[in-house]
Image: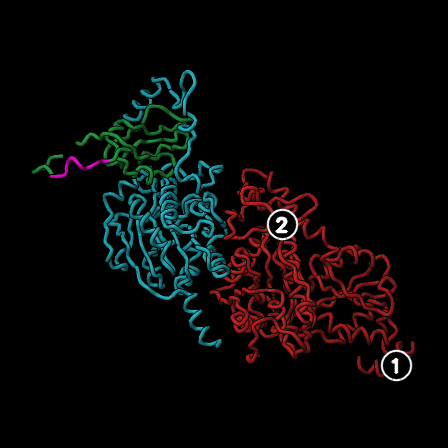
Chain colours: A green, B cyan, C red
Amino acid sequence: MKYWREPLDLKDIRVPHGDIHVLLERCKGCGWCVEFCPRDVLEVSEEINSKGYHPPRAARPEACVGCGLCELLCPEFAIYVLEEEGEVVIL
Amino acid sequence: MVAETKREGLAQRPLRRAFETDGEPEGLDEEIHGRHPLDDMLRTDRLPHIWCPGCGLGTALTCFLSALRKSGLDLKKAAVVSGIGCTGRVAGYVKLDSFHTTHGRAIPFATGLKLGNPELAVIVFSGDGDLVTIGGNHFIHAARRNIDLTVICINNFNYGMTGGQVGATTPLGGVTTTSPYGNYEYPFNVSALAASSGAVYVARWTVLHARRLERSMMEALLKPGFSMVEVISPCPTGFGRRHKQREGLDTLRFYRENSIIDHDADLHRADIGLGGPLIEGNFVNIEKPTFLEQRAECLAKALQ
Amino acid sequence: MSDTNQSGPLSGEFFMQGDIACAEGALTAGCRFFGGYPITPATEVAQRMSERLPQVDGMYIQMEDEMASIGAVLGASWAGKKAMTATSGPGFSLMMENLGLGIMLETPCVLVNVQRGGPSTGLPTLTGQGDMMQARWGSHGDYAVIALAPSSPQELFDLTIHAFNLSERYRTPVLVMTDAEVGHMTEKVVIPPPQEIEIVERRKPTVGPEEYLPYHVEAGEWVSPMAVAGEGYHLHVTGLTHDERGYPATNDDSAQWPLVQRLISKIEENREDIIILEEEGDCPLEEVEVVVVSYGIAARTSLWPIQMARKEGINVGLLRLVTVWPFPDDRIRALAGRVKSFVVPEINMGQIVREVERCAAGGAEVFKVSHPGGGIHDPQQVLRVLRRAAGRDAEPGQLRAQGVPSQTLEAS
């Protein structure tokens, strides 16, 4: 992110980090979490679950800020995110 | 051509199961079958649910359960009443007192439940076909009376469970199994119908706008009186695929391109057509004594 | 009617219209919810309930139609209240689907049908008994039903209480099949003090939410204890065929067999407890020539023809069906082997008579006395059939020769 002037409290800002959990067997491969993640964290994985769907995986887990949109959007109760400490790569 | 190539490509690669490992997997069971934060509000012995991949019902339910948790309402006193249809199956998945009743008649049942025990927080969770087509009469009367109910109306513009027939909310031109040449009937505007009938809280959101939907659901849960949230949801199997939206994802993309948030919209100009725009927002939030409040005031005077 | 202001059920002797007696019976039984819709000749029940329920801290609501009425009644029952609705033929037809839901969910409640002339809009202000078969078979699918038939305002009071008791004991909607004559006639009704009236309440669960199964029935029992909404049991009930947990079980017929069989058996196998009959005669019914089988107002209007027939020397007995469904198969079968014939006067074109024919199975002749509705039977019509049933359809001259008094002959 480009600032025209660096904010005075930049060192105090703590951007949260999210830890993504996917319940592989529940996924039905709708692709919504992958499409609408605002940080492009997820991608459709190569693996399949026992029903033949490709669950998502965190391709760029370091970028996750734990916003929880994937958790709210998922129709299958198959993904959730836990907030945890960690460095976030600020783009 | 592209599809062919893709298929070939996949066939060449060995199919790897998501959970195959060597040695003892640690924590793997959690990841395969796991526990979701909302699982304690779900009848997990009945998951996975019956809804199609790309159906918005799961999202609406997620938003609802999250809203219910955030509302602080006593879950032992929350009761969900549904009718018949895909949305009607919601009652079977929530770990609350839940009642799966007859087609169109969820609202009278919910009325009896609420008036039988006013401490209950009664939620009606049903579809557009069930609530405003066959159930239209009950819908407008409960709104008229301002019975303290929270009505979540999932609008997917067709009767989905039976394969996608035309309903009272199908847009003009909509192709369904019983309107094969395109629907030539004007549809209901569910939000306008609720507002005109006297509902004190009316909101419309698509499942894509999940955060706002969750927030509206919470407001509706806490609002005394007839509160209705219209949820615009994809139905790829019954409706979407007949309108160039073969997957739920295509419909969500359509919502992203075509929805306009306008809380002050004139509801009578906010009909939903096949091509959009799709106007959504928190349309109505007014104060009005509920049925029980009106009754108590009147009887107090009369029965001195 | 409008000067009663009592914070509880009534008690004492009253000169009361049938419909009012029905409402008061419900209140005495503990009914605290009425969801109804106006329809002649049942409107007075709703009117009385709208007036009295607020006095006793109950809830009256007039719903937008009869389907909503029975829907609200079921909902109130699942909230823990005793609930009732009252209607007539056209409304009864509308209620059929939700009656099925009530039966499937095993919901205690009472449905009063003050019958009138049909079919369709028919004769709104005049009596009929044309819904008796509909009471048994009106909803779709297989099930059993309990239906009571009062013959007087006093009985309408008593049987409404009894209907509530049966509904709570067997966890089923119970029908009170009365008619416009009984509903609109005014007669003496004696209401005993509350402590003298037996009131049955539904059984509640003895286990906690994690062990409770809404439709698990112990061996030797017929229904499960009933938890309701708001008690922390997070129960799920559905009109779909369900298993013990209350969850839909619709992938094959494995849950259908035990469920449907139990819904039918819980009533059919408990006939001894449920069926009430009134037998009247100069001797036990097994020894009479002709048995009049009737119910409701038609049983009452048979009393005079029976008296006249007895004066003519015909040995007639009366079997009054206070409970019409389940039908007393065994009693009819037992009598069919002994008596000469059955006569079934009813204000319809022959409905319960078919049950009598079925059970008599040729063991006795069965004569119907039909009436399309709109009035009560002409007693002479019934008397003529009684004579024919007794084999005495002779000309007046022959009757005089047999010693029948002239007064009786002139009356016919």
- Image quarter of residue B227: bottom left
Range of magenta residues: A8-15
- Image quarter of residue C292: bottom right
Name the subunit of mark 2: C
In the picture, the quarter occupied by the C terminus of chain C is bottom right
Relative height, residue A13 to residue B145 (above, below): above
Relative height, residue B227 to residue C180 (above, below): above
Q: Which mark is residue C142?
A: 2
How far apart are labels 1 and 2 at the CA level? 53 Å
Q: Give coordinates of residue B207: x percent, y percent.
A: 32, 44
Q: Is residue C116 visible?
A: no
Relative height, residue B283 to residue B145 (above, below): above
Residue beneath the point at 45% across and 50% down: B80
- Label 1 Cα crowd, 10 Å radius (few <14 / some 14-19 / many 20+): few
Dot placed on the residue nearer the N-terminal end, 1 or 2 = 2
Residue topped by disc 1: C405
Q: Give coordinates of residue B69: x percent, y percent.
A: 38, 46
Q: Which mark is residue B212?
A: none
The foreground one among B270 and C161 is C161
Tell me whether marks 1 and 2 sit on the same chain.
yes
Q: Is residue C296 left or right of residue B5?
A: right
Name the subunit of mark 1: C
In the picture, the quarter occupied by the N terminus of chain C is bottom right
Residue beneath the point at 30% across and 35% down: A83
What secondary structure is marked by label 1?
loop
Tell me which amino acid carries mark 1.
Answer: Pro
The foreground one among C356 and C33 is C33
Q: Is residue A75 left or right of residue C319?
A: left
Q: Give coordinates of residue C400: x percent, y percent.
A: 89, 79
The image shows a total of numbered marks equal to: 2
